[in-house]
Amino acid sequence: MNRWQHPWRVLVVPYYLNRYARQVHVLRVLLAFLLGLALVISSGIPHGGWMLVTILIVLGGVPHWGGVRRKALERMGGSLLGALAGLIAILLHGVSPWLCYGWMLLVIALSSWHAQGKGGYLALLTGITLVIVGGLGDESINEALWRSCNVLIGSLIGMAAAATLPLRAIDSWRFLLADNLREAALLYNRIARRLPVEGDAALDQFNSRLIRMRSLLAAVTQEAVLTHRQLDQVQRCQRGVWTLLDRMDEVAATTPALAEDRSPRRAIVRTLLRAAHALRFNQPQLLANPLPAADNPARMRQPTHCHWLVAELSLTVEALRCQLQEILPRLIEAPPPARSLVRRLSGSRRR
């Protein structure tokens, strides 16, 4: 089916969302900003500029849902704590300006301390919001409340926009992994058959995708019930495949071809291609067949360096297949952002 017959599919199908990720990201930032601007103009909310600033902060630099959700929740939490601290500063200023300044210094010190830890963004925003809301303690409580309200509304608009046009780190991560596995299969197939290859260019692209996948790990763990350790194991296996192909490319020209019948070439290539297909189209059943046990080169009559590399590659690919067989169903089960957001909001109402 031609995608141009149904252009709306670009905004709902994960493959197209990731293929045109930059355009989709710009579109949702503009839509969220337009909604916030219309709300500010139509309602005349005081200090509405803070709502627009919050929308840009929440959405602007973090395209994936896991990062947007985490950033928005931390911004709302930091805004609430900072607004409360700002209101306390205003009340203390009525008693004594020095008491107010001492309170502000204490909050800033705690904010700076925790800004270096796990909840660094929340802690930093607490200190920033304290200054925005409380000023030097001589601000009115009415203005402080309006500023806090605008920050919270802006965060909700940003989260709603991110959930409506979801760019999930899960999808970006698995598509990059699928591309790497397919690249590895084609490259190894050509090396083993002693066909001409541009190994450096292919391996550079492989490594570039690997680096991009590393930057997505935190957001992926936010979107799916997976630990950083599980994803890191997949990353290490990919790095192992990259290293083995790099070394194999260097020695393959001086060794006999590894395309003979007893070679595991076909099984390795088939496993890599099936794994890439499983990731791209969410078909975990393609990961069910294990690789045959790798032959021990020590038992061969005249083993070459390349035979040892192939045996190691077979073990690495099999380990990668087992890991993907375990985590792919969890990636598939991860709820869409809109459903996840509704669950969180309904759960908070019940509490």
Image: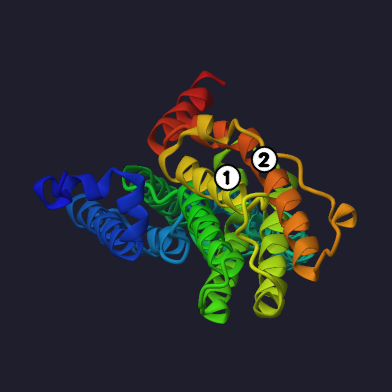
Residue 102 screen position, x and y as percent = 77, 65
Is the C-beta separation of discs 2 and 1 under 8 Å? yes
Q: Secondary structure at mark 2?
A: loop
| Marks 2 and 1, how far apart at CA | 7 Å
Residue placed most toward the observer, 279 or 296? 296
Q: Is residue 1 above or below residue 107?
A: above
| Residue 137 visible to the viewer | no
Disc 2 marks which amino acid?
Answer: Leu
For label 2, the residue is 291
Answer with left or right where residue 180 lies relative to residue 310: left
Residue placed most toward the observer, 120 or 103? 120
How does the figure colour the protein chain or chains?
rainbow
Residue placed most toward the observer, 199 or 330? 199
How many numbered marks are there?
Answer: 2
For label 1, the residue is 271
- Label 1: how many Cα within 10 Å (few below 14, some 14–19, many 20+): many
The residue positioned 57% from the left and 57% from the top of the image is 216
Quadrant assignment for the C terminus: top right
